[in-house]
Amino acid sequence: MIYLNGEWMPIEQAKIPVLDRGFIFGDGIYELIPVYRRKPFRADGHLARLERSLAEVRIPNPYSRARWMELVTEIIARQSFDDQGVYFQVTRGVAKRDHAFPAGVTPTVFMMSNPLVTPSAEAYANGVACVTAPDNRWLRCDIKSTSLLGNVLMRQFAADRDAVETIMFRDGFLSEASASNVLIVKDGVIASPVKDNLVLPGITLDAAIELARDAGLPLTLRRIPEAEVRDADEVWLSSSSKEVLAVTRLDGKPVGHGAAAGRPGPMFARMRAAYQAAKDAL
């Protein structure tokens, strides 16, 4: 069952007018909340990001945070599986095709939940391969917009090369991956790019940052030169579906140095354990 504009229905019965601005312009905002054992993980962070993104593009938020949580709880209960990815989006609504914002339009709200697919045990144990590319997307990557063509092209660039993600650099500095945030480890210190308009403020990244600090792992947020990523001891991805995942090959070369090159590193093992403990504590 899915939710569309106040009604629950089978997804096969759901219909949206072709003049919906989400379809015409990609004029919408979305979120995905991971759910473990029917318990949402960091829902408040996801809903706060939804509110911020809607405000940035001036789409009226159709619901209070309490109402959003009621809907999230209900859609979880309507599914037969325990671990879920609750996806929802809000578009500006249906109007005559014109770039300017239409007046008096009701936003379109769509929600669905699917089984949460996380990386395999093998991926966690051995890490994954990524490739790199210049970040040629727009300059408001901090907004979680449904306009994802740039990310789609970057993700396909990785898929065409049998890689999990494309890690991107803008003006010689790390930004993010096509569907993940990126962290590195160098000389025992975790680093991730500063939160600005060039990166999505990841909720899973926030969790990783908090868990690292709680565990006493050194961490810094700063601009990270491309050369430093390529010379890192460890490289990680973070996202709602990947959780925190080690990158062990980058552009065909092993990540890391010496005998540990091409294997998940010791800092990743500590982060992975902390993340699993946070999930178990729900």
Image (tube, rainbow, N blue to C red):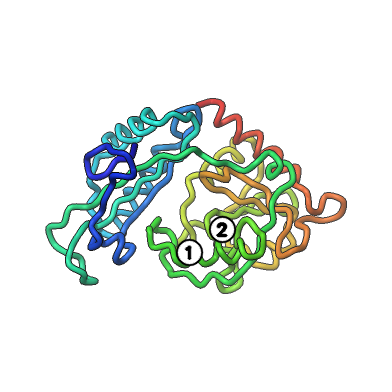
Are circles 2 and 1 on residues that touch, CB within 8 Å?
yes
Amino acid carrying mark 1 in the image: Leu
Seen in the picture, residue 9 relative to 249 is either above or below; the reply is above
Task: Please give the count of numbered marks on the rendered protein.
Answer: 2
Q: Quadrant of residue 176?
A: bottom right
| Disc on res. 198 | 1
Q: Nearer the viewer, residue 101 or 84?
A: 84
Instruction: Tell me where residue 60 appears, x and y as whole percent.
Output: 22, 52
Does residue 222 appear to the left or right of 232 in the view shown? left
Indicate the secondary structure of the residue bearing disc 2.
Answer: loop
Q: Which residue is painted at 40% across and 55% down in the image?
A: 144
Instruction: Tell me where residue 119 appears, x and y as whole percent.
Output: 62, 43
Seen in the picture, residue 169 relative to 45 is either above or below; the reply is below
Q: Earlier in the sequence, mark 2 or mark 1?
A: 2
In this view, the residue farthest toward the left is: 104
Seen in the picture, residue 70 relative to 126 is either above or below; the reply is above
Q: Which residue is painted at 28% across and 55% down in the image?
A: 91
Instruction: Tell me where residue 198 appears, x and y as whole percent.
Output: 48, 64
Does residue 141 appear to the left or right of 27 in the view shown? right
Q: Which residue is painted at 49% across and 63% down in the image?
A: 151
Q: Residues within 10 Å of mark 2 (few under 14, many from 20)?
A: many
Amino acid carrying mark 2 in the image: Pro
Q: Residues within 10 Å of mark 1 (few under 14, many from 20)?
A: many
Does residue 222 appear to the left or right of 89 in the view shown? right
Q: Which residue is mark 2?
A: 193
- Quarter holding the N terminus is top left
State how far apart marks 2 and 1 are (Cα): 9 Å
Q: Which residue is painted at 31% across and 61% down in the image?
A: 23
Q: Quadrant of residue 270?
A: top right
| Disc on res. 104 | none
Instruction: Tell me where residue 31 appears, x and y as whole percent.
Output: 39, 48
